Amino acid sequence: MPDRMSDRLSSLILAVEAADSSKLLHEAVQNLASANLEGAIPTLIAALSYNNPGAAVAAVDGLIQLGVPSVADLLELLDQHNYTARAWAIRALAGIGDPRGLVTLLGVATADFAMSVRRAAAKGLGMMKWHWFPESLREIAQEEALEALLFVAQQDEEWVVRYSAVAGLQALANAITVTHPEWRSQIQAKLELISASDRSLAVRGRVEMALQNLQVESIEHQPLKIEAQPSPLSATDWQTIMEKLSDRKGQERLVLAEGDPRRYKQLAESIQKAEY
């Protein structure tokens, strides 16, 4: 059986390498992604750098489906100078929700120049795998996500990004129902303000959907307090995440006063410079 799987993987990878047209490359990457084989990760990562959006979308979908095993290679790709590949990698990280991508998503959601990348990051912040976090670190991370999403939902110039931030706030509010009811109330209050003031009908409609969902969740569901659950991350991973979050909060204090939205853009620029 392992030999058959290995032969299949090799065949699918060869098809990607042999593709001599945009259409064939798209199909080959899609077939490789659909196989859901961890051995395909390096080839799917490489496809993010191709000048073929269809192949890149298929690769992102495949990497998200594979999940955690993809994250290390995606994070490594963030250190490269190919912005297009980096943007696709951020989309994949947002879809996976791995805590190792948290600080990257925080910076991207609030400051990246590409609308589609900010949109993906904002949605990803709300769908982070919070149950993996140790309890003490979870609170710090969720507070950062809350601040970033509130800023994006109210300040981003593109309605599609604000729309995704509202979706992220809804998901985050449901995740903190028991642990931080005061934050949930803050989210609901901000959403009500956005509902009355946002210039986009689509955003206002999404806000109303979020508010209705939060009301239903509050009335019908009383979730148990989320306890830290085993995750595939190592102690070193958590230490790195903590250090990045600490650096982020330190830069916020040093660069601009608390509450000034410009701090996010300056912080993101510093993060991007550090990555390169």
Image: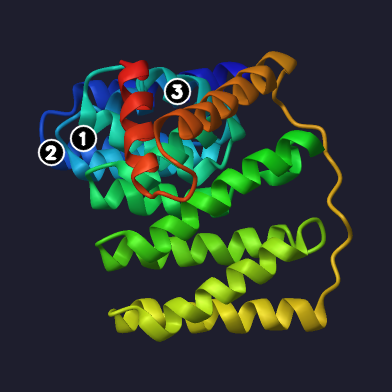
Front-most of 179 and 60?
Answer: 179
Amino acid type, residue under disc 2 in the picture? Ser
- Residue 41 visible? The answer is yes
The quarter holding residue 246 reads top right
Specify few, some or many for label 3: CA neighbours under 10 Å numbering under 14, 14-19, or 20 or more: some
Amino acid type, residue under disc 3 in the picture? Leu
Instruction: Tell me the element at label 1.
Output: helix
- Look at 68% across and 13% down and name the residue there: 236
Front-most of 149 and 16?
Answer: 149
* Cα distance in 3D space between marks 2 and 3: 27 Å
- Residue 58 visible? The answer is no
Asked whether the residues under the numbered discs 2 and 1 touch, taking CB atoms below 8 Å apart as contact, a structural biologist would say yes
Query: Which residue position is annotated with label 2?
Result: 22
Q: Picture coordinates of residue 45 (x, y %)? A: 36, 25
Q: Mark 2, mark 3: which one is toward the viewer?
A: 3
Left or right: residue 211 versus residue 258 is right
Which residue is outermost to the left? 21
Q: Picture coordinates of residue 194 (x, y %)? A: 43, 76
Answer above or below: position of 62 versus 226: above
Specify few, some or many for label 1: CA neighbours under 10 Å numbering under 14, 14-19, or 20 or more: many
* Cα distance in 3D space between marks 1 and 3: 24 Å
Instruction: Tell me the element at label 3.
Output: helix
Query: Which residue position is annotated with label 3?
Result: 75
* Quadrant where the C terminus is found in the figure: top left
Q: Picture coordinates of residue 46 (x, y %)? A: 30, 23
- Look at 55% across and 62% down and name the residue there: 169
* Quadrant where the N terminus is found in the figure: top right
- Look at 57% across and 53% down and name the residue there: 146
* Cα distance in 3D space between marks 2 and 1: 5 Å
Query: Which residue position is annotated with label 1?
Result: 25
Asked whether the residues under the numbered discs 1 and 3 touch, taking CB atoms below 8 Å apart as contact, a structural biologist would say no
- Residue 54 badge: none
